[in-house]
Amino acid sequence: MAVKFSNNPMFGGFAAPFRGEVDLRDCEVEGEIPADLNGAFYRVGPDFQYPPKFANNIPFDGEGSVAMFRFAGGHVDLKTRYVRTQRFKVQQAARKALFGMYRNPYTDDPAVRGLSRGTANTHVVFHAGKLLALKEDSPPVIMDPISLATLDDYHTFGGKLTSLTFTAHPKFDPQTGDMIAFGYEARGEATDDVAVYAIDRTGQVTWEAWVKVPYVGMIHDFAVTQRHIAFLVIPMATDVEQMKRGGVHFSWNSQLPTWLGVMRRGGDGKDLRWFKGPERCATHVMGAFSDGEHIYIDMDMGLKNQFPFFPNTNGEPWDRKAAEGHVTRLSVDLSKKNIESYDMEILFPREIGILPRQDDRFHTIPYRYGFMPTIDASRPVDERLANAPTRPVNCYTKFDLQTRQTSTFHIGNASSLQECCFVPRSATAPEGDGYLIGVANMLLEGRSNLVVVDTQHMADGAVATVQLPFRLNQGIHGWWVPDGYT
């Protein structure tokens, strides 16, 4: 049977599968790669191996495909590989899709019962000498950081990971080298259990705690400080009845509140307190820190459902305006024993965007700078894109949380930017002094570029552009590993 993808617009354009594995030595570079930029930029995203079993599946369900851009001496080499998950290998043998709708085991082929549904398509990080490809419904997959060969398709840290799930957004303590992680729906589909872990710099699990959430739903990211751990439970609820009808895992229930849970880091979880807030959608943390018993968490936050492919339970259409994300600070003073809610402040009301990042050397501690892809609606769009359903994400913005000032890189009027990753100019460079690296969709040319932007000169444009002769699969998250670590 010929391989044929559906006419679903979600699988067209830059969301269409790439399906290739590439080795490209000496990519073409416009401009000059900075001499101090040496290491590897890894990024991962979904890339369907075979046409999905159901034409109405969503792009998030594609197999994980990792790209590695290796920078050395002013040159850039590219390598891409699929993650050889249990799912990938069984489908490769069958030469067809065997897993059904996004995170819905009710729709799977009976032949895959008992195998991991994980796609390892959401994030890729480096810890304890290992490259971890992550998807929040399953344990990590370990890849070789040089060859991108899959080494372990179901990594449980020597059996110490008892949760069935593992976050796509672990945090890294710059003082201890620990990786702090969690899993939600940790005892299986639709369970209200969350497991929290610390994994030391050698890869050994040193702490585990289990807690309960007010209702079962998406907890894509979390906040970690030197003293506290916090979870934001948003109304993106797990919908078992929808799954039984053949739908996706989540639906947005606007009748549910948003809950912020805060617990002591390193404890048994019994001190966990839940604070109630209004309907909001926020899935990514820019940064977080504690000042005594006061915790501060900065996220990109919208008023309602930010995912057009997850339905609203009330049947209302997706509201693009209400989905717009703004950098918002959540805070709560834990020394106050009788409070029931948390505080919210929009820090930058003008900038609209998603996928915030920070200088990763400042995880868990007070920080000053954040970065995010944003939309500047005042910039002109190429007239050939005037009828496109969405505006291009045309900027990277640097946020100074101390002065509340911003500086912006603009890509042009015919390109759209994916997530950016911050690279420090050196290991000892001041916070926020370095480069932003990210993939750009060249919308009229049907191919991808990688841009390198100096954070001290955002408005001056890219210092270097790695020009690819093809389109990469759409990425989600990425990670930088400096030379000497791989």
Image (cartoon, rainbow, N blue to C red):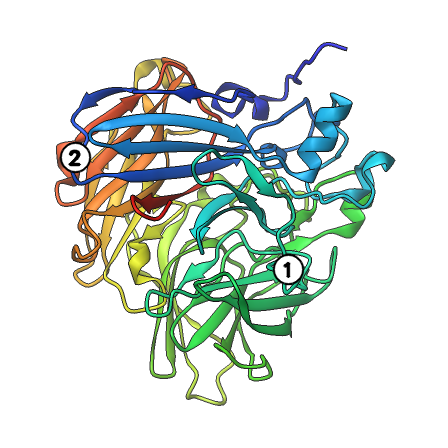
- Which corner quadrant holds the C terminus? top left
Q: Up-down: is 333 above or below 188?
A: below
Residue at 34% x, 20% y is 25
The answer to whether residue 146 shows anywhere in this view is yes
Tag 1: residue type?
A: Gln
Residue 187 position in % (x across, y down)? 73, 62
Residue linked to disc 1? 255
Left or right: residue 137 compared with residue 282: right
* Quarter of the image where one finds residue 376: top left
SS assignment at label 1:
loop
Side of 447 relative to 81 (left or right):
left
The quadrant the N terminus occupies is top right
Q: Amino acid at mark 2?
A: Pro
Q: Separation of disc 2 and disc 1 at Cα?
A: 51 Å
Is 21 rendered above or below residue 257?
above
**Pick the front one: 155 or 228:** 155
